[in-house]
Image (cartoon, grey):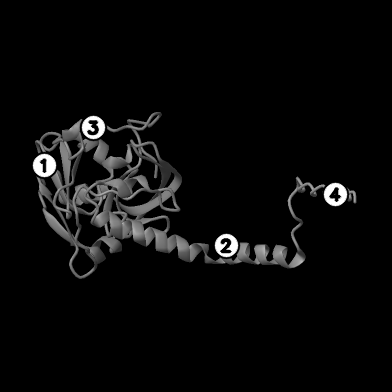
Amino acid sequence: MAEKPRPKPKPKPRPRTGGAPVGRRAMLGMLGAGAAGLAAAPYLQRGWEGFLAAASEVDATGLTGLLPDPGGFRYYSVVGSVPHKDETNYELRVGGLVERPRTYTLDELRALPQTRVVHDVLCTDGWRVDDTPFEGVPLADLLDAAGVRSPGAAVHFTCFDGAYTESLTLEQARRSDVLVALGMQDKPITHAHGGPVRLYVAPMYFYKSAKWLSGITVTDKVVPGYWEERGYAVDGWLDGADRHGGTA
């Protein structure tokens, strides 16, 4: 008895090149998830900023400085931990070659006339944040109140992290776009960004804007700051900066 021929196998269906169609429910779910993500974005942003800020305080490697927060800034500290200061314990000392040394509390600085400066923030590492508003007391006002005396020619800045320092010539310090800043991006400066008070030098790279400012000392010459002692330029001018003026 002859064998029956085997049936030929049916060809397998070819996969669709455009992928499976998305059902209405699936599409609505995707849109809903996207909307939820947008609604949660501010909370996620604050959480990420808080994480970076906390991590930077215990990061001896400085690697957290490579991670941007949602606003484009990086968190840097040259020490492992920085104490927190507020209305109860913050002080800013102004002294050196001055007629009237003085120590300001945070409330006293807030009570002084404030100036707003909007400028791009640039770091030597290459990142930038455009049109960043800072608000604070013009450094020139504090110098005038103290009364600079001869042979005062420069200003040295110290910080309550116990390590960071910076300097400006007296001419640079008197510019209208150099602030003892209490506000940034229309809110008080946070601890992670150098608050409650930091220096802001708009026409120079951001390393000149010392965080956690605690001391202003008039000197007879420029004393190189923390990064200048490590090879950075003493005059950290931005390209195109007006080196003989200032904007308020």
Give the class, few, some or many, for how many residues have Cα within 10 Å of label 2's Cα (few <14, many ≥20): few
Of the two numbered discs 1 and 2 on the same chain, state the one appearing first in sequence.
Answer: 2
First in sequence: mark 4 vs mark 2:
4
Nearest to N terminus: mark 4 or mark 1: 4
The residue to which callout 2 is attached is 38
Going from N to C along the chain, the mark reached first, 3 or 1, is 1
Percent from the top left, x then y, of residue 242?
Answer: 37, 31
Three-letter amino acid code at the position of disc 1:
Arg
Q: Which residue is mark 4?
A: 6
Q: Secondary structure at mark 4?
A: loop
Mark 2 touches mark 3? (CB < 8 Å): no
Distance in Å between CA atoms under marks 1 and 2: 56 Å
29 vs 103, left or right, is right
Q: Number of numbered discs present?
A: 4
Give the CA distance from mark 4 to mark 1: 109 Å
- Foreground mark, 4 or 1, reads 4
Point 73% across, 51% down: residue: 19
Q: Nearer the viewer, mark 3 or mark 1?
A: 3
| Left or right of residue 1, residue 36 in this image | left
Determine the CA span between mark 3 and mark 4.
Answer: 84 Å
Quarter assignment of residue 45: bottom left
